[in-house]
Amino acid sequence: MKAITYGSYGGPEVLELTDVDEPKIGPDWVKVQVRASSVNPVDWKVASGGLDSALDVFFPATPGWDVSGVVEAVGPAVTTLAPGDEVFGYVRKDAVRGGTYAEKVAAPIRTVAKKPVNASFAEAAAIPLAGLTAFQCLVHALDVGADDTVLIHGASGGVGSFAVQIATSLGARVLGTASEANHDYLRGLGAEPLTYGEGLVDRVRSVVPEGVTAVLDLNGADLGVSPDLLAESSTGRIVSIIDPAVKDMGGQYVFVSPDVDDLNELASLFDDGTLTVEIASTYALADTQKAWEENQSGHTRGKIVITVD
């Protein structure tokens, strides 16, 4: 089968479309015929060697953790899925090797769920990592509810777009930082946009004089001023997916985990129209280098999808 692989750390130039063996599946795994994957910054950060101290990478490695596709085969212990089921998932394993940028992928059943009925394969592939990140930060870590005013740093990106919609669905008032070019986009998602950077504290306090009740940091740029944005009663109610230094502020660092129940919640949110997916662009598997170059530019709004014929 065809897959994207890299044999050493580096940039997009190390990616190659190669022939690899089909993946094996264990008793509680499924084999998925991949229809689409999506690009997340962690994909190329791993390939650059930036996470070598945290993750075992075995070369040649196939990148990618997001997937949508059709179950081809199941292990003998699998009872929740069957061949022919359309699924999506965040297929993060204990080591980096057999990723989702491939024609087929082996996935532990803890990482995949039935895809949203109303989603295309491209839309479904764009949801898992970014959607789970937003959901787990807001629902599990911050326990956001109708009485909250949430500030999201980096609200127009892949995770931010989902976070705005999820926080709004929970009844919260949402403020989101972004460049001015993305302010109308954020309004359309239900957020009150603010420009990031110098003077943010004054801009937030002009809108919410008493301060916000929760902060979700998705870009790291304004994490340092986040304690000054919180209401006095919400001290330490900060979550970051970028910088573990948030723990020194009394906050929480979150690294997204595969979770079938959370995937099912996201599927329900999509199917009832609460959650929408912004797809910035799509690329064929053979053009993954170009997909990574676009993602690394830092100017993408929404998700970049890789399709597999």
Image: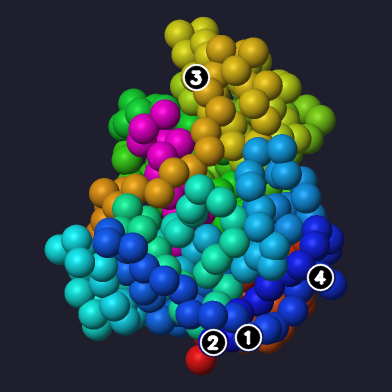
Q: Cα distance, mark 2 to mark 1?
A: 5 Å
Residue 190 versus residue 14 in the image, above or below? above
Considering only order in the chain, which callout, 1 or 2, is on the residue closer to the N terminus?
2
Q: Cα distance, mark 4 to mark 2?
A: 19 Å
Q: Cα distance, mark 4 to mark 1?
A: 15 Å
Q: In terms of secondary structure, what is the magenta stretch mainly?
A: helix
Please tell me which residue is depicted at 46% across the width and 73% down the height of the picture.
Answer: 23
Marks 2 and 1 close (CB-CB < 8 Å): yes
Considering only order in the chain, which callout, 1 or 4, is on the residue closer to the N terminus?
4
Q: Which mark is residue 1?
A: 2
**Any magenta on residue 140?**
yes
Residue type at numbered disc 1: Asp
Q: Residues within 10 Å of mark 4 (few under 14, many from 20)?
A: some
Q: Which residue is mark 3?
A: 237
- Where residue 105 appears, as percent x and y from the top left, is 46, 72
Numbered disc in front, either 4 or 1: 1
Magenta-tinted stretch: 125-141
Residue 1 versus residue 299 in the image, above or below? below
| Secondary structure beneath label 3 | loop
Residue type at numbered disc 2: Met
- Where residue 228 appears, as percent x and y from the top left, is 65, 15
Q: Residues within 10 Å of mark 2 (few under 14, many from 20)?
A: few
Name the side, left or right, on which 263 lies relative to 10: left
Residue type at numbered disc 3: Arg
Considering only order in the chain, which callout, 2 or 4, is on the residue closer to the N terminus?
2
Q: Which residue is mark 1?
A: 19
Residue type at numbered disc 4: Val
